Image (cartoon, rainbow, N blue to C red):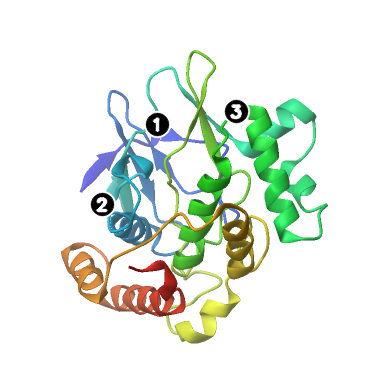
Amino acid sequence: MIELNINDMKDTERHSSKGNQLKWNPANTETWYKADYIGYEGLTEYMVSHLLMHSTLSTKDFVLYDTEILRVGKKDYLGCKSSNFLPDGWQLLTLERLFHTLHGKSLYQSIFQFGEVEDRAQFLVDQVIQMTGLKDFGKYLCTLLTIDALFLNEDRHMHNIGVLLDPLGIYHYCPVFDNGCSLLSDTTTDYPLEEDIIDLIPQVQAKTLSTDFLEQLDAVEKLYGQKLHFDFNGQIIETLLREEKFYSTDIKIRVRDIILQQRRSYQYLFS
C-alpha cells in the first residue's frame, strides 16, 4: 500500500472517453499512480504490459505497470503504478493537440472526412510525418492497433496517442502506455461482471480509424506490414494472475478467459 496526498493529484489532457482517472505523481519521485475509476483498470494495465514482455517489442518500447493499493486520506483505491518515462525538460504532446496547434482544427474530425479506412490511416501517418519528421510512424501505428485489437482497447483516440518532444525540438516515439480501457475493464457501465464475455466482446468498439478493431488492423497491416508478434500462452497468463496480489478471483478468471479468447481470435499474431 502507498499513501498519497490529495494535493499531489495531477490532471492531464489525456482524458479517457469514459472519464478522467485519478492520477498522482508525488513530489521528488519518479513514479506515477492511477486509481481504478470504472472497474479493474489497474489489473488490465498490469496484464497488458506484462504480456508485452512476451512480444517482439523491446522493453523500452512500452511502460510496465504493477498493481497497487492507493490510500488517499481515509479511502483506499485499487490501481496501478509505473515509472515516469518522460525525461526532464521533455514534453508529451498528443496528436490532437499538435494538429490543432498547427492547423486550428480537429485531427479526429479530419481523419473521418475520408470514407475508406486505409485512406484515414494514410492521412494520419502523412500528417504525423509532416508535423514531427517521424518517418516510421506507420509501423508505430500498426503496433498500437495490433495491441488494441488483441486486448480490446476501446480508448485509442487522438488524445491518447502522443509523441515526445525533447528540449532541442526533436520528436521521438512515445512508449506504449495507458491501456487501462482494455479487457472489458469497464464493469460500471458497459461490461458488467455477471454478463458473458462471448456476448460482450463483439460490443467493444475501437476509436482510432474505425469502430471495428479488425478492419483498422487489416488496413494498417496492408499499408505497413505486420510489425508485432507474441509468444505468451495460457500458463504465462495464469502465472501473472496468480502473482498479482490485490484483485478478486472472479475478476482474474474473467480477465484470463478474455485473453484466451482473444488469443484464439488472433492466432496469426503468435509464434
Q: 259 left or right of 14?
A: left
Q: Is residue 46 above or below residue 158?
A: below
98 lies left or right of 239: right
Residue name at image x 25 percent, y 70 percent: 237
Q: Residues within 10 Å of mark 2 (few under 14, many from 20)?
A: many
Amino acid type shown at disc 2: Glu
Residue under label 3:
133
Q: Disc 3 versus disc 2: distance between alpha carbons?
A: 38 Å
Q: Nearer the viewer, mark 3 or mark 2?
A: 3
Q: For residue 194, say whether it is visible.
A: yes
Question: Residue 68 shows which numbered tag?
Answer: 2
Q: Quadrant of the C terminus?
A: bottom left
- Residue 181 visible (yes or no): no
Which quadrant of the figure has residue 10?
Answer: top left
Q: Which residue is mark 1?
A: 7
Q: Nearer the viewer, residue 72 or 258?
A: 258
Question: Residue at the location (56% across, 41% down)?
Answer: 137
Query: Which residue is most to the top?
Result: 168
Q: Position of residue 161 (x, y in %)?
A: 56, 43
